[in-house]
Amino acid sequence: MINSHLKLLAVCLGAQAAMQKTSIEHGVKPGQVRVLWALQLLTRYTTVPVAELYATRLQAPTRLRAAVGALVAAGLVARSRNRQRQHVVRITPKGEKLLQDSVAHLLNHVWG
């Protein structure tokens, strides 16, 4: 469901250009920006189990695992374990900044 919402957003608003510009500025791949957007939709200021992120089918599990690992390495996402010993992720302040930049690029692209 989230994947279809992101694709719809990309088609309707030209989000690809915004993601590309954001990814270049922050040194990440456009697919990693999409993962951050999905996390934003799933978490809303809390953590989300990695298994729930996999359930979105945003990307193939191996690619998603690599994207999350790269986001963790870049300091955009933090990974930990919860009380149920599940791996959970949350967006860091640096990741929030990247999301804000991507929205700004998106608005600039749409409204000029």
Image: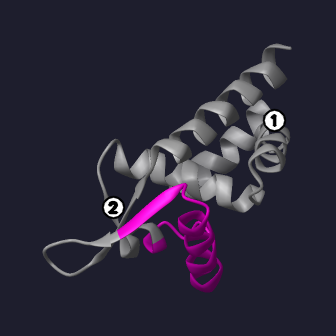
Image point (76%, 60%), residue name: 29
Residue 66 sits in quarter: bottom right
Residue 57 sits in quarter: bottom right
Of the numbered discs 2 and 1, the one sitting upstream in the chain is 1
Name the residue at the bottom extreme: 62
Q: What element carries label 1?
A: loop
Q: Is residue 89 above or below residue 110?
A: below
Residue 68: within the magenta?
yes
Viewed as shown, does residue 7 lie left or right of 17? left
State the mark number for residue 14: 1
Q: Which amino acid does label 1 sit on?
A: Gly
The residue beneath circle 2 is 48
CB contact under 8 Å: marks 2 and 1: no
State the mark number for residue 4: none
Q: Which colour scheme is used?
A: one colour
Q: Is residue 65 above or below residue 96?
A: below
Image point (86%, 14%), residue name: 112
Q: Where is residue 45 in the image (x, y as percent from the top left)?
A: 33, 42
Q: Where is residue 105 in the image (x, y as percent from the top left)?
A: 76, 29
Q: Is residue 42 above or below residue 84?
A: above
Compare residues 75 and 47 and report the one nearer the observer: 75
Residue 11 sits in quarter: top right
Image point (20%, 71%), residue name: 82
Magenta-highlighted residues: 54-79
Q: Is mark 2 on a helix, strand or loop?
A: strand
